[in-house]
């Protein structure tokens, strides 16, 4: 995986009769439809068994994108087709926030999430440590803390006690 591909995530959010589900896309091919064998299952009587197919294709920079195609990979189209961003299309290269309608109350929204590369650098040779004002002073100096008497053994009572 190249650096460009490492910094992007593909997300498909499905909304249908079953509710809302999120799919992170990373496989080369996804089948979408009503059939329980589909990679992304749509729950609706208005959707074809093999309604659409997502295909991963490479970009020039080493990253990839997804194309959605109506029907299955053998060329059989769905009964109702795809409405993508308000236009009926047979195929479409997905872009961030594209909306795909498969049927009444069955839709998907595609998101391409990009994040900037986080560069890790070795620590600076001049490490800066913040010091609180009460941490200053000479640790050998008696004024920094209460003096300790060394001539009396600790824990033994003295004669005047």
Image (cartoon, rainbow, N blue to C red):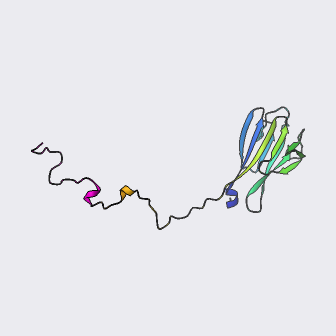
The residue sitting at the left extreme is 159
Q: Name the residue located 14 percent from the left edge and 51 percent from the top edge.
A: 152
Going 89% across and 39% down the picture, which residue do you hit? 80
Quadrant containing the C terminus in the rendered view: top left
21 or 51: nearer the viewer: 21
Residue 91 point in image, percent of width and height? 87, 49
Residue situated furthest bottom in the rendering: 125
Range of residues picked out in magenta: 140-161
Image coordinates of residue 53 in percent, x first then y, are 82, 46
Residue depicted at x 74% and y 34%: 19
Q: Is residue 101 above or below residue 93?
A: above
How many marks the image carries: the answer is: 0
Q: Which corner quadrant of the image does residue 6 belong to?
A: bottom right
Residue 145 in the image: state x and y as whole percent: 28, 54
Comparing 34 with 152, the one in front is 152
Q: Position of residue 23 (x, y in %)?
A: 72, 43
Q: Is residue 61 magenta?
A: no
**Location of residue 70 (image quadrant):** top right
Residue 74 seen in the current view: yes
Question: Is residue 34 visible to the viewer in this orientation of the structure?
Answer: no
* Magenta stretch, main secondary structure class: loop
Query: Would you say residue 156 sits in the magenta stretch?
Result: yes
Q: Is residue 80 above or below residue 54?
A: above
Instruction: Using residue 94 as the reference point, say whether residue 121 is left or right of it.
Output: left
- The quarter of the rendered structure image containing the N terminus is bottom right
The image quarter containing residue 2 is bottom right
92 vs 118, left or right, is right
146, above or below 78, in the image? below
71 or 144: nearer the viewer:
144
């Amino acid at each position: 995986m190249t650096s460009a591909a490492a910094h992007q995530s593909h997300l498909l959010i499905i909304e249908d009769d079953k509710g809302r589900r999120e799919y992170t896309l990373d496989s080369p091919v996804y089948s979408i439809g009503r059939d329980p064998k589909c990679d992304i299952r749509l729950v609706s009587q208005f959707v074809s068994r093999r309604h659409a197919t997502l295909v991963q294709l490479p970009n020039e920079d080493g990253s990839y994108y997804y194309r959605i195609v109506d029907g299955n990979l053998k060329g059989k189209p769905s009964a109702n087709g795809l409405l993508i961003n308000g236009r009926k299309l047979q195929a479409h290269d997905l872009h961030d926030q594209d909306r795909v309608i498969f049927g009444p109350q069955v839709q998907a929204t595609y998101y391409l999430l990009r994040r900037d590369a986080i560069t890790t650098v070795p620590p600076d040779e001049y490490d800066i440590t913040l010091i609180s004002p009460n941490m200053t002073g000479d640790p050998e100096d008696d004024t920094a803390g209460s003096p300790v008497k060394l001539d009396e053994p600790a824990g033994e009572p003295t004669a005047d006690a």
